[in-house]
Image (spheres, rainbow, N blue to C red):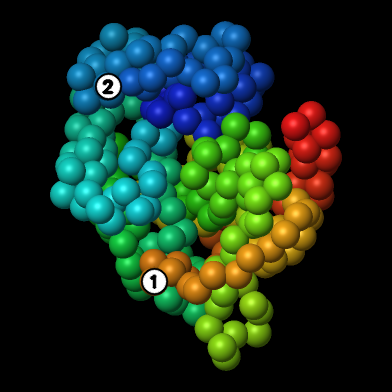
Amino acid sequence: MKSLLVTGSSGFIAPHIIKQAIAKDFKVYGIDIKDPTLPVEGCTYIKDDIRNFDLEKINNLDYIIHLAFVTNIPFTINEPVSTSDDNIVMTADLLNKATTSKVKKFIFSSTASLYGNNPIPWKENMSSDPIEPYSWQKLSCEYLCQMWTKRYGTKTSIQRLFQVYGENQREDTALAKFISLRKTNKPITLTETSENSDCRTGRRDFIYVGDVASAFISNCLSSKTGLGEIINIASGTMTSMEEVAKVIGGEIKFIPKRNFEVESHQADLSNCYKYLDWRPKEDVLDWLKKFCDKELKNA
């Protein structure tokens, strides 16, 4: 039986990975400093800081999917030093433990936000352009993974996630905030783009969390990954935030653009299709309509 450790198991994405991995007969461990928000039957949960945990306690561990990270961009802007220590040092420590434990593959969850102001569609070989600490920290951890493979031989792979949505999403995500505002009959606030833009609000490449989870599982099983390659995980299509707000419904209020946001992002999926047996399936507006019909009906 294949074994998998998922860090950050109380977060948004982890329960979806754990559920799919168990369905594929993995032995799954989840570790987090918090209790799981959506516990999955069959998973062995460990309540601990991964930096304090002895990986040798898990015998013959095959894979690690590393999701644990301080993820709030405004918080990293306010606390660049402490969050860098938390995120980068933690990842280096876990890579070292993975090498000692002879883990078969270490998969790092990175972010599309480090593409910054590159022209779309974003390709993995573009120069990185992080415009806030969170993206820079993710980029630093990408370099860690690639160096670790070259120096220590531990197989690593990097998945750059675009705008993830779905059940159990964090309260600080745009969609969760929009739905919360709609429930309380408050206007949804949208940031406007620049005057010469062809779209009034930002456009995002949304990817469903269940699709993200299947991409991680596919990466574990792929014989083509493990050399520190970077893989975009996205739908490959753009949806404007105004379209999203209109599906949710209610009043819309426009506010000026924030300086840490880019106007549009869209993924090139060539690498994804090269390395993984995976395709995105869910459409964000279709999912959102079904989800809102249920959520707002019960509100």
- Which mark is first along the chain, 2 or 1? 2
Q: In this view, does 122 lie above or below 16?
A: below
Q: Closer to the observer: label 1 or label 2?
A: 1
Question: Which quadrant of the structure image shows residue 118?
Answer: bottom left
Q: In the rendered view, tell whether residue 285 sits above or below residue 169.
A: below
Q: Dot 2 corresponds to which residue? A: 49
Local crowd size for mark 1, using a 10 Å CA cut-off: few (<14), some (14–19), many (≥20): few
Residue 109 location in percent, x, y?
43, 44
How packed mark 2 is, by other alpha carbons closer than 10 Å (few <14, some 14-19, many 20 or more), is some
* Residue 140 placement (x, y as % from top left): 25, 54
The residue under label 1 is which amino acid type? Asn
Q: Residue 38 is drawn in which quadrant? A: top right
- 85 left or right, relative to 44: left
Viewer-proximal residue among 275 and 186: 186
Res. 226 visible in picture:
no
Question: x%, y% of residue 266?
Answer: 58, 67
Q: Is residue 246 above or below residue 14?
A: below
Could you tell me which residue is drawn at 43 percent across and 69 percent down? 258
At 45% across and 24% down in the image, what residue appears?
9
166 up-or-down from 191: above or below: above
Residue 60 percent across, percent down from the top left = 36, 14
Q: In this view, does 228 lie to the left or right of 225?
A: left
Seen from the viewer's position, the closer of residues 38 and 63 is: 38
Q: Do the residues labelled 1 and 2 touch (CB within 8 Å)?
A: no
Q: How many marks?
A: 2
Residue located 63% across and 42% down the image? 180
Question: Of helix, strand and loop, which one carries label 1?
Answer: loop
Residue 9 visible in the shown view: yes
Residue type beneath disc 2: Asp
Q: In which quarter of the image is the C terminus?
A: top right
* Position of residue 205 in the picture relative to residue 229 (left or right): right
Mark 1, residue position: 259
